[in-house]
Amino acid sequence: MSTTVSSAAEPVLSLRGVSKTFGAQRALDSLDLDIHQGEIHAVVGQNGCGKSTLVKLLGGYHTPDPGSETAVKGELFDLGSASAANAAGLRFVHQDLGLIDELSVAENFFMMADQAWVSRISKADEWSRAGRALEEFGYEIDPRALVGSLTAAQRTAVAIVRALSGEDRPALLVLDEPTASLAGPDAQLLFDALRRLTAAGGSVLFISHHLDEVMGLADTITVVRDGRKVTTVMSRDLSHDRLVELMLGRALTPRSESDSSAMPGTSDVVPRLSVRGVSIGGLRALDLDVRPGEVLGVAGLTGSGREDLAGAVAGQTRHSGEVTIDGKAIRPGDPAASLASGLGYAPAERRRDALLSTATLRENLTIADLRSVSRARRLSRRLERKETQKWMEALDVRPPMQERAIDQFSGGNQQKVVLGRLLRTRPRVLVLDEPTQGVDVGAKATIHDLVVGAAAAGAAVLVCSSDVEELVQVSTRVLVLRRKSPSTELIGTDVTVERIEEEQLRPTEVRPTNDAGRDSDPQG
Amino acid sequence: MTDLKSAASVLSPRRASVLYLLALITLVFAITIPDLFLSEITFQSIARSQAVVGILALAALLPFVAGEFDISLGTNLALSVILVAWLSNAYPGLGIMVICLIAVLVCTLVGFFNGILVGKLGINSFIATLGTSQILAAIALKISNNEQVLATLPQAFTEVGRGRFLGVPNSLFVTLALGLLLWYVLQWTKVGRHLYASGFNREAARLSGVRTERVVIGTFVAAGAIAGLAGVVFIAQVGTFSNSIGMPFLFPAYAAIFLGATQFNMRPNVWGTLLAIFTLALGVQGLQLSSSGSGFWITPLFNGAALVAAVMFTRQQSKRRAKVVDEVPSAPAVSPQPDPSDDHEAAGVRADTVGR
């Protein structure tokens, strides 16, 4: 019996000296972490601090560097195997939830359950078991409903309850950004469920960068910065500002209240790009204006709506709302029309959405405007080569080989070509999403010069980026998104790395809430 | 200098392997069975029979370049044949030109239907056209009553269909003229570039202003029209419909496209496709003449083996290319360029050689 007593005092999960190196980069640096029974433990940090690496190590997607030690309830176990993690009692709910929309709630519940291959499935039994499990956590969701017909909050609930509803009681529930897609009251419902879980002796590891939630929910907070643990503190001993300081690793700059969350003062220059009431998955009724010669940077943490903004404005995706260029509305969901109206768009997913793979650099560069390299409606190889040569020099493409397949160039050169493709069309509006993701330092500088140059030549430029330094370098104004809406606009001397990072992490209560509008997901 | 280099490289074994295969086949059979193989009859019959396969392959090439399959082309050809045969018997007053026009028009409409299924409704092209092909087969069977249908054709029409000019069957001129037209469109026009772009990466093409939906529908419409033309050429040669025609043309057509895509500019192209068709046919013919019994089983065997070999070859090439890409680090602070000397020769002249 003495063993059971000691194991209760033992941490549920204990990590010692866990490191993970990718190439030359150390994502996690000898991290120590203890999570006790009945505790909600939050791990916070900026984008790229190592939070997701930690989750992936626990889940078995990555193998840690040698020399680390992990124990669950005092028993050692090896990180790096998904089945070992599962056997040790770790359960995961990732941001994408891992649900299948076309199946019912009950089917989603039991699709992962261990069953004999040919065992007969009783639907009534599945329905009642799934329904009971959901009820236990205070959710009233019909187990027969298709997951695709549920609201975002209900889907999250299904994923969490499913993770907890195994044969044996899980030791630890790991939630990776569970509220990225939830609005206020829905998140509250989730938190109630989690508190009920810990009251019953469960433990939760909670990864988030919504600090107001973290402060309200977690008992213990571990701050991670640049792959190292900064500290572990009780959340009641901590103020919001102090937490931000710990995450950023420096003191907060005094906030000048005058301009924060004030919308832009109307300038005498007429906006070239106007966005009104654009709503789509991650965005709620977005308004913004960009004037000619201006670079508007858009900042925001993952889940803030930043990822969806560029595609919606550029018309890659359909949305409700209006986008106008010089007063002329462009049709959403019709990139050819947008391009014809003078809007050039470089998507974030270069390989998936921008590169004509296996085609040559020349073909990739000229595709958006072939008329200027044609003579009498016939493509002129001579003109096309000359044009490509000119642009390779302007873009500083290395090696300058226009007949080489685009796939054989480095990411930076590929991105330069994508940018060149747009600049060739002489765009009046340029929309760039993560313009330097996966790009080396040299190419990054070239790309920034091109962006600033395009604005100087009179284009209105919109840059969405998770790279705060980049935004500071190129932007005349920066819009910070939080919770699917613009929350703050920074102008002039306020456009600094420090200010943007702080604004991204500001608690949402400051902003007047307009949660009356439902989540964009359709309700079943 | 560079032109000379590119001209030489286009004929290099790596980029024109089928040309060497053709030479090898000719050489082997010229030695083993010189009397049978090196006869005019051999070459006449190949040219005649492959002209229709060639036209059908060119039809299939257009959707293929844009990244889609059209499995219905074989039965669409059969539909064209039965329409001409039936109309020539039932409505001889229409005149053969009108009858042919109707046949081609109907086939074009079938192509448009396929285009809507794939381009507009987003159905997987393989599945959509597989379904269409069976519907077309049913229509052909219904009209023909599952019997051979002898067409009543004007003598002048069959004379053109079976005739020769300068020793070459007239039907082959149709194939070559069509090849020339498609080559021009694919290689020298904006439309052609948009087709290839849609095939390389549909979404990237769309975001670059290519109206990909229209492009896809257009390729199916053109493919349907060309399949109709192939049917007209076929009945001008043969004069009858039988329920076994159509589908058997499809396989050699696609085998030739795949094999042809490993040639010259290393992507689906007109001349690679046509070269592959005649090379495969020559190989089949040689083997059939060599075998003592009736070598009826040789055609599918040779075509199938050639297709597998071609696809393996392509796979090997893309693997080699992928290896080069892997060596390019994606996001390190210092990004050393891959040593270009390795594939400079091949990649550097890639599309220079196209369309010379």
Image (spheres, coloured by chain):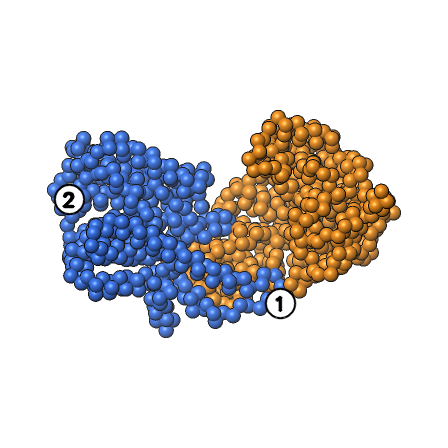
Chain colours: A orange, B blue
The local secondary structure at tag 1 comes to loop
Q: Residue at x 50, y 43 (%)?
A: A334
Q: Earlier in the sequence, mark 2 or mark 1?
A: 2
Q: Residue furthest left?
A: B155
Decide if residue B355 is on the left or right side of residue B85. right
Name the element at disc 2.
Answer: helix
Q: Is residue A339 visible?
A: no
Question: Which percent across, then down, holds residue B285?
Answer: 23, 55
- Judging by the rendered image, the residue that carries numbered circle 1 is B334
Which residue is identified by label 2? B158
For the C terminus of chain A, give its image quadrant.
top right
Which residue, as the protein is rendered here, is positioned at the far right? A237
- Image coords of residue A146 (percent x, y): 59, 31
The amino acid pointed to by label 2 is Thr
Which image quarter: residue A370?
bottom left
In terms of image quadrants, where is residue B80? top left
Name the amino acid type tagged 1.
Val
Give the residue drawn at x 36%, y 49%: B62
In the rendered image, the vertical position of residue B350 relative to residue B193, given as above or below: below
Q: Residues within 10 Å of mark 1 (few under 14, many from 20)?
A: few
Residue A171 or B173: which is nearer the viewer?
A171
Picture residue at 57% right of the left edge, 52% below the top: A349
Dot 2: chain letter: B
Q: Is residue A172 visible?
A: yes
Q: Position of residue A470 (x, y in %)?
A: 66, 58
Distance (Cα) linking label 2 and label 1: 70 Å
* Residue B33 x, y percent position in the rendering: 19, 61
